Amino acid sequence: MYLLSRGILAFLIACIGFTFLLCTPQITGVGTGSETVIGKIVHEDGTPASGTVVTLYPVNFDPASDPEMLRLCLDTTDSNGYYTITINSSKVDVYTLQASNLKQQTRTIVSDIDISASGDSTLIDAAPLYKTGSIQVKFSDIPATRTGYVFIPGTDYYSYVKNGSAVIDSVPAQTILQVFFKESDLQDEPRSLAENIDVQPEITTIVASSGSLYSRKIFLNTTSTGADVAGDVTDFPVLVRLHTGNFDFSQAKADGSDLLFTKENGLTIPHEIERWNSSRHEAEIWVKVDTVYGNDSTQFISMHWGDPEATSSSSGPAVFDLSAGYKGVWHLGDNGETVLDATGNNNTGARNGDQARVKGNIGSAQSFDGTDDYTDMGDVCNLDTSSLTVCAWIKKIGEDKIQTIVAKSLGNLPNETYGWLFQLDGDGALSIFMASDSGVWGDPGSFVLTGNTWVTDSSWHHVAAVVDRYDNDNCRVYLDGADISALPTGGDIGSVGAVLNTAPLRFGSDSNGHCQWEGSLDEISILYRVKSPDFIKLSYMNQKSDDKLTVFK
């Protein structure tokens, strides 16, 4: 509850008797007739806003369904900006205050005014008026013929849906707590479309809705009790795993095509369904979040489903956006000859040997027998002078031998067309190699970085290498989200020139077919960006089998 100063309170209480005559509520009940709301309206500069119409509505008031209540209780502010509204019913305890200054074309909304203390005066802090903007709701995933209306509960702001869209005009430029939708004559209760919508002056804020019947919040916990990441991470693909413990597959379409994700403000965000198995009640979905906030547990995204008329909006290129640096993302759940790239680069490849689909860390993976298995993507991912981040999930079986994870290199000693290679050494140490000149490793034109922790078991591990073409100190290798770089490195990354060759990019062997992988590989991604330690750690904490990032509520 908000309180005014004692001087203002004394003045307002003296005005109650006169203002009661100005406000004659139309609701009925057993109220005492003395529940009074007292406050002040000001302009944005803090000066009194006289002549402002102030109205109270029940917190869940629906302006289209209850037109007879449009003037439930109102007052007009005096020369000092004060108003007093008296309510004579105890049937409603919580109200929303709406104020409009026609001369200045400014407005405000004050939510959750609790008058449950019978007979007492409820005192409200001075409420500033704001310029206005608009909220447009786009029903992009339902038929344009669907009827209904959208509204801000507790106010007289509403708009009917026409051609799949509705615009609520003249909304105060502040955070609007909720926007509801009600389908005409077909829906008993309205449905919340969006929450905490930031309206900007003279700008239309767009909210997308699937018309879904069901929704659920997924909180992103980066505190010490969750993913334990302190810094903000941008352009992050959040992995959402669905199973019987957090999702009822019978409520969704058989292929998950009715799935939709939104931000806290109701705006739609891209997603890609990697796998949807309704019979086994399992699914893995990637959702692009523009910023995951560090050391936070209040941020959430919302998942919506249940609209039988929805069409699929799953899109790998929208999630693994080229503008974010992605050059290729291979989920490796393929069961045919072709191995697909989830990005818009379409860097597809082919399986060779007895490579086969197996259970992976995320959905399905590819197994390699260490003899003649590899995936060939062709002549793609020449770095030239770009930086590099490469990530993968690995599960090794082979022992005491060099095993290649990803390579665009013929291997051996550095040379002008060496390219780059990411591998496990014979002892299980993680290494990244890059070269553009001949010699031995450590000479100018070459660069090698090795980890100081060894992979000796046959469990799934997340591995990553980051090569910053401008700074040796930013070059890192990671195992299970932890920096395991053994510094100093061999060579100087600044001495490496254009990294180019015509060798094929391969998974599970170098470009000659040597040093083959024995075990399984899953979720390989290549970016021409330097990704932060927080990005790498968040990827591991989110993607490991006991996901520490997402919390369903």
Image (tube, rainbow, N blue to C red):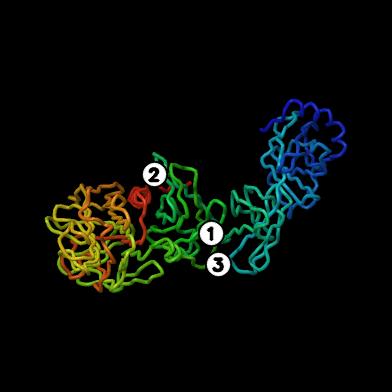
- Residue at the image point whose x is 34% and y is 51% from the top: 536
Is the residue marked by circle 3 packed among few (<14), some (14-19), or many (20+) residues within 10 Å? some
| Quarter of image, res 419 | bottom left
* Residue farthest to the left, as pictured: 400
Q: Amino acid at mark 2?
A: Val
- Can residue 202 be seen from the camera position used here? yes
Query: Marks 3 and 2: CB-CB under 8 Å?
Result: no
| Quarter of image, res 91 | top right
Quadrant containing the N terminus is top right
- Residue at the image point whose x is 31% and y is 66% from the top: 383
Is label 1 or label 3 in front? 1
Is label 3 or label 2 in front? 2
Q: Amino acid at mark 3?
A: Glu
Instruction: Give the residue pinned by disc 3.
Output: 309
- Give the x, y percent position of residue 459: 23, 52
Is the residue marked by circle 1 packed among few (<14), some (14-19), or many (20+) residues within 10 Å? some
1 or 3: tag closer to the N-terminus: 1
Instruction: Give the residue pinned by disc 2.
Output: 229
Q: Nearer the viewer, residue 360 or 465?
A: 465
Is the residue marked by circle 2 packed among few (<14), some (14-19), or many (20+) residues within 10 Å? many
Whether residue 236 sits left or right of residue 39 in the image: it is left
Q: Amino acid at mark 1?
A: Thr
Q: CA distance from mark 2 to mark 1?
A: 25 Å
Q: CA distance from mark 1 to mark 3?
A: 18 Å
Q: Tag on residue 268?
A: 1
- Residue at the image point whose x is 42% and y is 55% from the top: 236
3 or 2: tag closer to the N-terminus: 2
Q: Tag on residue 334?
A: none
- Give the x, y percent position of residue 502: 25, 74
Q: Nearer the viewer, residue 444 or 379?
A: 444
